[in-house]
């Protein structure tokens, strides 16, 4: 049940830790 929210949080953290270039790419995908 907490798989979706957990994954969303993990993605947010990953994006935050990821470089700005990847952040833009991910943001564009989302």
Image (tube, rainbow, N blue to C red):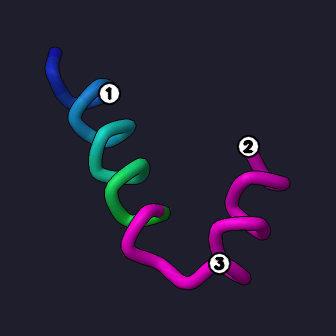
Front residue of 3 and 18 = 18
Residue 24 location, x and y as percent?
Answer: 76, 66
* Element carrying mark 3: helix
- Pointer 2 or 1: first along the chain: 1
Q: Residue 20's mark?
A: 3
Q: Does 12 sit above or below residue 24?
A: above
- Pointer 3 or 1: first along the chain: 1
* Element carrying mark 2: loop
The crowding category of the residue bearing disc 1, from other C-alpha atoms within 10 Å (few below 14, some 14 to 19, many at least 20), is few
Front residue of 21 and 6 = 21
Q: Does 10 sit above or below residue 18?
A: above
Find the magenta span and give its range: 16-30
Residue 19, magenta (yes or no)? yes
Q: Residue 30's mark?
A: 2
Q: Quadrant of the N terminus?
A: top left
Q: Residue 4's mark?
A: 1
Q: Nearer the viewer, mark 3 or mark 1?
A: 3
Describe residue 20's horizontal placement relative to residue 9 as left or right: right
Q: Nearer the viewer, mark 2 or mark 1?
A: 2
- Pointer 3 or 2: first along the chain: 3
């Amino acid at each position: 049940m907490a798989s979706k929210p957990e994954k969303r949080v993990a993605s947010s953290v990953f994006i935050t830790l990821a470089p700005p270039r990847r952040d833009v790419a991910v943001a564009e995908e989302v």
